[in-house]
Amino acid sequence: MTQHYPSVSGSAEAPGVSSDAGENARRALQGVRQEVAKAVVGQDAAVTGLIIALLARGHVLLEGVPGVAKTLLVRTLAAALSLDTKRVQFTPDLMPGDVTGSLIYDGRTSEFSFREGPVFTNILLADEINRTPPKTQASLLEAMEERQVTVDGVSRQLPDPFLVAATQNPVEYEGTYPLPEAQLDRFLLKMTLELPGRDDEIEVIRRHGSGFDPRNLAAAGVRPVAGETDLLAAREAVARVETAPEVLGYIVDLVRATRSAPSFQLGVSPRGATALLNTARAWAWLSGRSFITPDDVKALTLPALRHRVALRPEAQMDGVSVDDVLGSILATVPVPR
């Protein structure tokens, strides 16, 4: 039977979820975007991606040239959500224990005690993650996947919610250690932060000329408008968003097409298909729907899959980009009606 996907009003709610609780959580999270806009101009897609990652219990890789407000974006989001955040500047001499924490000898008790590292927070800003060696990059794997840190055989749970927002510069590669495919696959989304348009850049300059201080978000009017309770209610609602069999088939067809694309030497794994499903589900709920449409899948295909594939060298030499190939796949894979 052909499945149709009608437009649903913003008041729709997933079955089995309190309409009031779900709607209040949605309004609160929509308010987060408005709060972030008080400090960050023209990065609405990245803000939405971070919120989707929080709802889907994933992590985000933010890629952009210096000066496009990657760090400010994460700090402002944490302030609007009333969540704890810590920043780690990844450098060549950074050690795993500097991130996860380590055992410290206490001379008074003649015992070792664990000192928590900055990973014990709600939102960890891993700044320039590709500037630290693989050993330190890998120290985040357990935290990202298992939500825990193991030191000296003892596992310690991380706070919930927990999100790693890692940044990297796509232009300067000297002295960097590119993330291996296995670690890239741990990120739910890869968001590309573009340079602002002319009007947005004028607004940025105007704000700074009027005294805007990115180190003082309270002075910019940023206030907490949502919190952990809203995120919990939202996650429960998102988990109940329905997915038609035809849409599941569409997601699988898109993923399988990446494995046979001539320009790719590495296609998307089943984990990528799951990521696309979870992010499309969160986006559908944020948009006020209790089911996923093919358009929801299309909207999240690039950020959910672009870091899970690898171009063949000959495609790179021809100037083909990952987004170009994924766009071609979106244009050719049949869409369910």
Image: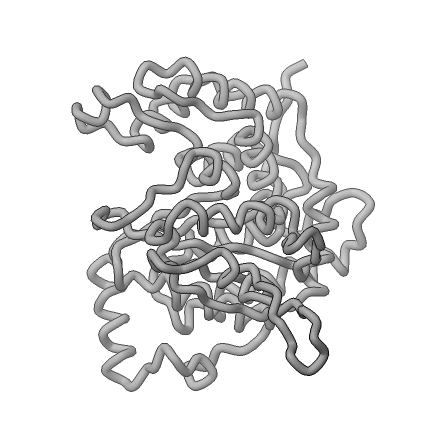
Q: Quadrant for residue 43, please give it.
A: bottom left
Question: Residue 225 versus residue 317: which sits nearer the camera?
Answer: 317
Measuring from the top left, give residue 293's x and y in whole percent: 57, 33
Measuring from the top left, give residue 172's x and y in whole percent: 21, 50
Give the residue at x 34% y 65%: 41
What's the image's color scheme? Answer: one colour
Give the residue at x 23% y 65%: 201
Q: Quadrant for residue 229, please give it.
A: bottom right
Q: Quadrant for residue 8, please give it.
A: top right
Regarding residue 9, the answer to whether it shows in the image is no
Measuring from the top left, give residue 36's x and y in whole percent: 46, 68
Left or right relative to 239: residue 76: left
Left or right relative to 278: residue 23: right
| Quadrant containing the C terminus in the rendered view | top right
Question: Residue 21 versus residue 139: which sits nearer the camera?
Answer: 139
Give the residue at x 29% y 78%: 207
- Classify 175 as above or below 226: above
- Classify 189 as above or below 100: above
Left or right relative to 4: residue 43: left
Regarding residue 69, the answer to whether it shows in the image is yes
Measuring from the top left, give residue 83's x and y in whole percent: 59, 69
Task: Tell me how many marks there are.
Answer: 0
Question: Residue 142 versus residue 39: which sits nearer the camera?
Answer: 142
Give the residue at x 46% y 61%: 125
| Quadrant containing the N terminus in the rendered view | top right
Question: Residue 31 versus residue 175: which sits nearer the camera?
Answer: 175
- Classify 119 as above or below 302: below
Which residue is situated farthest in the left direction here? 318
